[in-house]
Image (tube, helix red, strand yellow):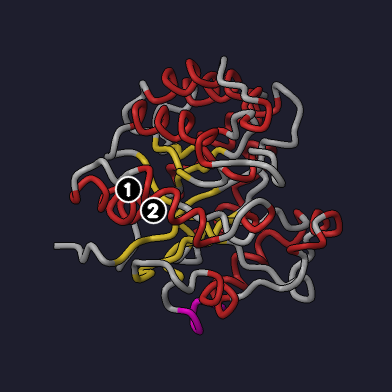
Amino acid sequence: MTDRRRYVDTHVHFWDSSVIDYPWLEGASAIAHPHLPADLERARAGVSLELAAIVFEEADCLPAHALREAEWITELAQEEPRIRGIVASAPLQDGEGARPHLHALSELPLVKGIRRLIQDEPLGFCTAPDFVRGVQLLPEYGFSFDLCIYHPQMGDVLELVAQCPDVSFLLDHIGKPGIADGIMQPWKDQLRELAGRPDIHCKLSGVTTEADHENWNRDELRPYIEHVLDCFGPDRVVFGSDWPVVDMAADYVTWFDIVQDSISHLNAADQQKIMYDNGARFYRLEI
């Protein structure tokens, strides 16, 4: 039986711009300094559960450095053995042309899935034929796909997943709804439609970052979190901290406590699924 005092964090970023180039950090000075496993350990001090495993999530590096990022995290895992999975970046927009990159990633045993960011791309980007084809290739390499979007792109995501029935999808950051503006629709209905495909999972992460960074409260987050739990149920929701991006609006311990409070009405077995079992299963972690 899984030890209920442990959890899996399915969404952690590490970076060091002296090793890998992250151009976007130039506009995020508060978190631009290196973030490494020792920093994570300090950030989570006070968390009530033991961290059993970490899934590293690609951190939007310079595209030319994407393979090197996965290699660097593989090296980092020699020092931090709790890194049990990597969600790497790949140029899926190249369609069949992405194969050499995917093959190279498949040579790294810790790589479990792919994330090609969609959030900053125009509408229609992820439904273009080449992108769809790139996503369709992933099962050949044993990879899942993390969807990282803003809520106006939910319609495109529904179209993408409909064309990729063999791909295991996970929606990051609950689809980034417009929490700061109090927007629920059409995200609310589209999320339920997405959840209608029984193999799609949703990551309870990045929620405070979509609220007003300086002036949010737990009450305004509650309806979004409750809707995720209602749509996906305890079998398809996974916990992620989104550290250190979470620090832009909250901090690791605050977000962890919000999630714990949000699932406290569930029985112990269902809480364990969200905090441990589902993430370990989806990413096929060896723990």
Tag 1: amino acid: Ile
Q: How would you rate the neighbour count of disc 1 (Cα within 10 Å): few for under 14, some for 14-19, many for 20 or more?
A: many
Residue 98 in which image quadrant: top right
Q: Is residue 258 left or right of residue 207?
A: left
Tag 2: amino acid: Tyr
Residue 179, position in %: x, y? Answer: 61, 31
Residue at left 67%, top 24%? 128
Residue at left 58%, top 59%? 251
Q: Is residue 120 left or right of residue 8?
A: right
SS for callout 1:
helix
Q: Earlier in the sequence, mark 2 or mark 1?
A: 1
Q: Depth check: give the residue in front, 98 or 172.
A: 172
Q: Residue furthest bottom?
A: 79
SS for callout 2:
loop
- Are dots 2 and 1 in contact, CB under 8 Å? no
Q: Quadrant of the N terminus?
A: bottom left
Vertical order, 204 against 81 (above or below): above
Residue at left 64%, top 36%? 95
Instruction: Based on the picture, tell me whether residue 77 belongs to the magenta stretch.
Output: yes
Q: Which residues are magenta?
A: 76-80
Q: Which residue was labeled with disc 1?
A: 274
Residue 182, position in %: x, y? Answer: 62, 25
Residue 166, position in %: x, y? Answer: 39, 32
Tell me the number on the disc at residue 283: 2
Vertical order, 102 against 4 (above or below): above
Gap between marks 2 and 1, in whole Å? 13 Å
